[in-house]
Amino acid sequence: MSRIQVDKIFDKEGTGAPTFPAGVVVTGVSTATTFNGTTFNGNATTATNAQGLTGTPNIVVGSVTGTTGTFTGSVSIGGTLTYEDVTNVDSVGIVTARGGLTTQKLLKEEVNITAAKLSDSTNIYLENGCVHIFTTAESTTSTPAIKYSSGVNLKDMMSVGESVVVTLITTANASAYSAQITIDGDAVTENWVGGSAPDGGGSSGVDIHTFTIIKVASSGTTDQQLTVIANHSKTS
């Protein structure tokens, strides 16, 4: 095996770096101030103006500056991700913005419109919104059955200290009102504003039943976990 032992290698003029047209194979550690070229295969600790970085094990760099980037797999960031001039942000967590966050001045809430009577459609699923309006004239009393969805309980979607407000709007009828509700299929205690449950509906317009549901405990019966404040309003 041939071996060259030198401290420094220069080009033939002695003024620059030599050229290796067939490439260089390094089996040990290669240390350099910078890597400047079109292709580099291996493991770099610092790379500037490098293109086509590939290799195994992973390529580790102190910082990366580029125009665009494409990732075919997941990207994990242990620190803070800072970016500017972003048109759309799709996030499932919390987004914090320094400024320039465009919001609508009009606060809107989804309303579920049902072309039927509440007494015929007592299942109230909050996945469809917290405000439900029934456009067919009511005719009798009813007991709304509130859940998050047909297969998910509302109390399981809430944490202690959270609340939701459910508003039910019905086309008025003097004999139509809701004096009780169920939540997740269970009877609950309604704390009625004014001290008593309604015993009649309005003669015209709409009736409005509002239920503020507060989760106060994480275990026990539905009635023990939830405090319900109820209100019934009539319009002309």
Image (cartoon, rainbow, N blue to C red):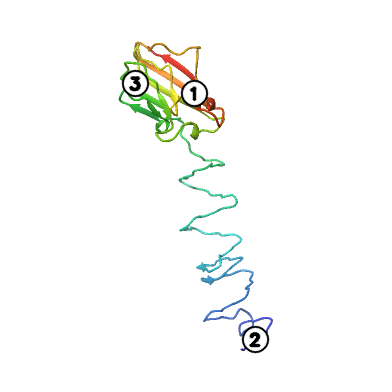
Amino acid type of the residue tagged 3 in the rendering: Ser
Left or right: residue 229 versus residue 16 is left
Q: Which residue is mark 1?
A: 212
Residue 209 drawn at (x, y percent): 42, 19
Q: Is residue 130 visible?
A: no
> Do the CB atoms of the residues marked 3 and 1 lie less than 8 Å apart?
no
Question: Quick one: label 3 or label 1, which is nearer the N terminus?
Answer: 3
Q: Nearer the viewer, mark 3 or mark 1?
A: 3
Give the distance between the C-alpha atoms of the residues marked 2 and 3, in whole angstroms.
Answer: 95 Å
Left or right: residue 24 versus residue 137 is right
On residue 4, which mark appears?
A: 2
Label 3 element class: helix
Left or right: residue 132 versus residue 34 is left
Q: Residue at x 59, y 49 (%)?
A: 80
Q: Which residue is mark 3?
A: 119
Amino acid type of the residue tagged 2 in the rendering: Ile
